[in-house]
Image (cartoon, rainbow, N blue to C red):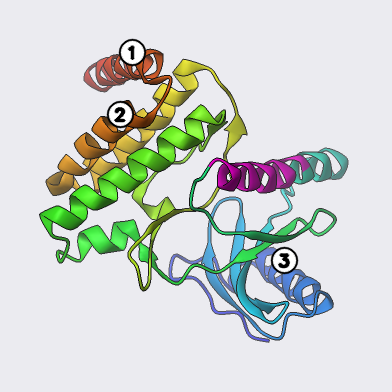
Amino acid sequence: RRMRDDDDGHGGGDRRGDDDACDACDVMRRHGCASSSMLSQGAEGRVYAVRFANRDAVCKQRFRKRYRHPTLDEKLTKARLNMEARTMIKARKCGVLTPNVLCVDAEECCVYMERVRGRALKEALRSGATSDEALKAFGREIGVAVSALHDGGIIHGDLTTSNFMVREGDDKVVMIDFGLSYPSVVAEDKGVDLYVLERAITAAHPSHTALFDEILATYKKHSRFWNPTLNKFAEVRARGRKRSMVG
């Protein structure tokens, strides 16, 4: 099956990338996937749209890091994959809306999960069609989700508007891409998570900064540990601004 090249040049120009893509196709065929097409490619892996167990799904396969020793690479990649799957499952148990994990193939570094139909929050905000009420609703949903995640001892690690999906049909916000997630109850880790989200919103959506205000207000209302977390968030924010001024 032909895999499309990404617009950012991560396609056929890299022979090793082609080999990895072919390997991914072979793996998905062995798992009985009727069809596959690449949806996206990032620094850590590729995401494919597939049919898995008679349902629409996505398969995320992590890259082999060729600059690392093969034994070390295999160990680290499997550990990272298992961590991602575990935190997604735990997040759902905490009440966070995330894709359901269908299957984990640690040997092939693949995780299969349900496909969320819709568009990234980033796209929704940039469309210019988001009303003030819709913006507040998004902020409330994200605030509830992040507070539940943190209270459950999970740090997402990459909270950006690209990693929230606005689900087709009901406009519910779904948290995705737990590739950098890890367990922690440390207030500073939670503060950094919030700071990353604030920076992502202010940098990519300067006209929608009210979204983060709503997220923070909702977080404070719903989190059991909001006080130490927001204190640390304020410290992290101050350090970040100082670094920006100093350069």
Mark number displayed over residue 231: 1
Q: Amino acid at mark 1?
A: Asn
- Quadrant where the N terminus is found in the figure: bottom right
Q: For the point 56% across and 51% down, which residue is it?
A: 43
Residue 205: image location, x then y, percent: 21, 48
Element type at mark 2: helix
Image spot of residue 245 (x, y percent): 21, 19
Residues packed near mark 1 inside 10 Å, few (<14), some (14 to 19) or many (20 plus): some
Label 1 secondary element: helix
* Residue visible at 76% across and 55% down in the picture: 109
Q: Which mark is on residue 210?
A: none
Q: With respect to residue 32, does 95 lie above or below?
A: above
Q: How far is mark 2 from mark 3, CA to CA? A: 46 Å
- Whether residue 67 is visible to the viewer of this picture, yes or no, is no
In this view, the mark in front (1 or 2)? 2
Query: Label 2: few (<14), some or many (≥20) within 10 Å?
Result: few
Q: Which residue is mark 3?
A: 20
* Front position among marks 1 and 3: 1
Q: Which residues are magenta?
A: 79-94
What amino acid type is highlighted by mark number 2?
A: Lys
Position of residue 26 in the picture relative to residue 163 (left or right): right
Helix, strand or loop at disc 3? helix
Q: Quick one: label 2 or label 3, which is nearer the N terminus?
A: 3
Disc 3 packing (10 Å; few <14; some 14–19; many ≥20): some
Kindly identify which residue carries mark 2. Answer: 221
Residue 191 in the image, given as x and y percentages of width and height: 40, 23
Q: Is the residue 190 above or below the residue 82 in the image?
A: above
